Image: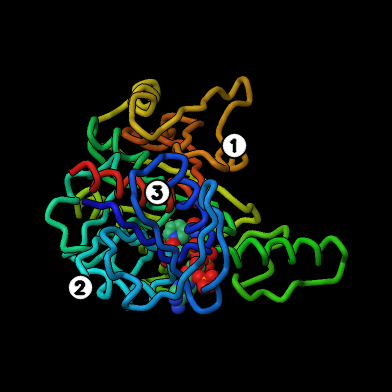
């Protein structure tokens, strides 16, 4: 039923990984169209052993397409999704545009696969920082309930797309050659040898748009508006891999050993946790890996029901491309 695929945003940071994953995970498609803007239409892209030409995103591009995987800016998704749905296709969209629409399921397959039922043609994949956090929260939520989460993120420059990594490279070269501050375009300030405690725009009572996504999307994915989330999102000079320091306050008390066992048994999680051996996940370990890596698991010293840990994931893979591909696999199985 889902045999004729289109990939919108095929030339982007996420789109390139989706292409790799289509091949690596051997999705059983018959035809594949690659779509992007007029900037890239006509360029050639390798898909496994084949070379394909990128086509222009326009309504007729979806004629005969059953399944669309899309990774474009919000305003582009806002426009083209209806072109695809009107032609009978289902869209798995990675942008933020549709995520909080009540008619659109927001899916992380390890957490809420059942919510995919009854979709109306568009299925959204969450924000990358939210995805890795909810994968980590899921086993704890099921075993002990969750009242509150305090999270600080350390987000890679590729979170801002291909332009983010180009800016990190240029800014670092400028700083090393002592040319002074690089003029920031993608980020708010010079990212070289720096941390920027702002991702997105000012949104709600001093919180940014990225931070409020972590609040709202988490509640929607768990279907539980009682979960309290206090996020701080920070851009760091790392190319791939978002890291998060997370404190979870549970309903029922949980020891660190119990939390470690729950993480180890959960799908999509790999535990790397032996401080005595300097063993814990770091962003360089997660580049190219589909799991959420968890370490530094310990009891909160300041409250009864707190579990603290460190969590790292490839933002372009589980944070985006892999999650979308897993959603496509769920559809193909249904
Ligand atoms: N990077 C990340 O870690 C994550 C990203 N996302 C979301 O995924 C989406 C894509 O992000 P990312 O890959 O990082 O961004 P990039 O900027 O690297 O890529 C954007 C892609 O969208 C295409 N595009 C842009 N404008 C148009 C247009 N007018 N018509 C058709 N295609 C267009 C670009 O094509 P062209 O080559 O023609 O410019 C390119 O293929 C965004 O919504 C982002 O929020 C979600 C989770 C994580
Ligand atoms: N904004 C995130 C990545 C992203 O694209 O998120 P969203 O899809 O929610 O805009 C970052 O910069 O790291």
* x and y, in percent, of residue 314 in the image: 51, 46
Labels 3, 1: front one: 1
- Which quadrant, please, contains the C terminus? top left
- Rendered view: 163 above or below 289: below
Which residue position is annotated with label 1? 285
**One can see residue 210 in this view:** no
Q: Using residue 66 as the reference point, say whether residue 49 is left or right of it.
A: right
| Badge 1: residue crowd in 10 Å (few <14, some 14–19, many ≥20) | some
- Rendered view: 216 above or below 3: below
In percent of the image, x 33 and y 56: which residue is there? Answer: 125
Circle number at residue 86: 2
Mark 3 touches mark 1? (CB < 8 Å):
no
Which residue position is annotated with label 3? 150
SS class of the residue under badge 3? strand
* x and y, in percent, of residue 184 in the image: 67, 74
- Between 264 and 148, the one lying in front of the other is 264
Labels 1, 2: front one: 2
Within 8 Å of ligand 1, the CB of disc 2? no
* x and y, in percent, of residue 152 in the image: 48, 51
In percent of the image, x 33 and y 33: which residue is there? Answer: 304
- Rendered view: 250 above or below 222: above
**One can see residue 95 in this view:** yes
């Amino acid at each position: 039923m889902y045999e004729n695929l289109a990939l919108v945003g095929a030339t982007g940071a996420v789109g390139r990984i989706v292409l790799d994953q289509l091949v690596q995970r051997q999705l059983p498609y018959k035809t594949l169209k690659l779509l992007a803007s007029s900037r890239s239409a006509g360029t050639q892209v390798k898909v496994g052993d084949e070379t394909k030409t990128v086509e222009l995103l326009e309504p007729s591009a979806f004629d005969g397409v059953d399944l669309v995987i899309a990774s474009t800016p919000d305003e582009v998704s806002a426009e083209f999704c209806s072109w695809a749905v009107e032609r009978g296709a289902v869209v798995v969209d990675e942008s933020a545009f549709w995520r909080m629409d009540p008619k659109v399921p927001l899916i992380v397959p390890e957490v809420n696969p059942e919510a995919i039922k009854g979709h109306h043609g568009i299925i959204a994949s969450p924000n990358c920082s939210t995805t890795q956090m909810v994968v980590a929260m899921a086993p704890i939520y099921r075993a002990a309930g969750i009242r509150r989460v305090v999270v600080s993120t350390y987000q890679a420059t590729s979170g801002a797309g291909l332009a983010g990594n180009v800016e990190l490279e240029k800014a670092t070269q400028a700083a090393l050659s002592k040319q002074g501050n690089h003029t920031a375009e993608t980020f708010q300030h010079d990212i070289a040898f720096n941390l920027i405690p702002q991702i997105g725009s000012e949104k709600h009572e001093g919180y940014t748009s990225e931070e409020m996504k972590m609040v709202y999307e988490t509640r929607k994915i768990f279907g539980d508006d009682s979960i309290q989330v206090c996020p701080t999102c920070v851009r760091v000079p790392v190319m791939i891999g978002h890291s998060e320091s997370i404190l979870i306050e549970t309903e029922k008390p949980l020891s660190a050993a119990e939390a470690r066992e729950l993480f180890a048994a959960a799908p999509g999680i790999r535990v790397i946790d032996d401080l005595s051996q300097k063993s814990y996940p770091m962003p360089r370990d997660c580049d190219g890996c589909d799991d959420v890596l968890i370490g530094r698991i310990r009891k909160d010293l300041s409250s009864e029901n707190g579990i603290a840990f460190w969590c790292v994931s490839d933002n372009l893979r589980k944070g985006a491309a892999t999650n979308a591909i897993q959603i496509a696999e769920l559809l193909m199985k249904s």
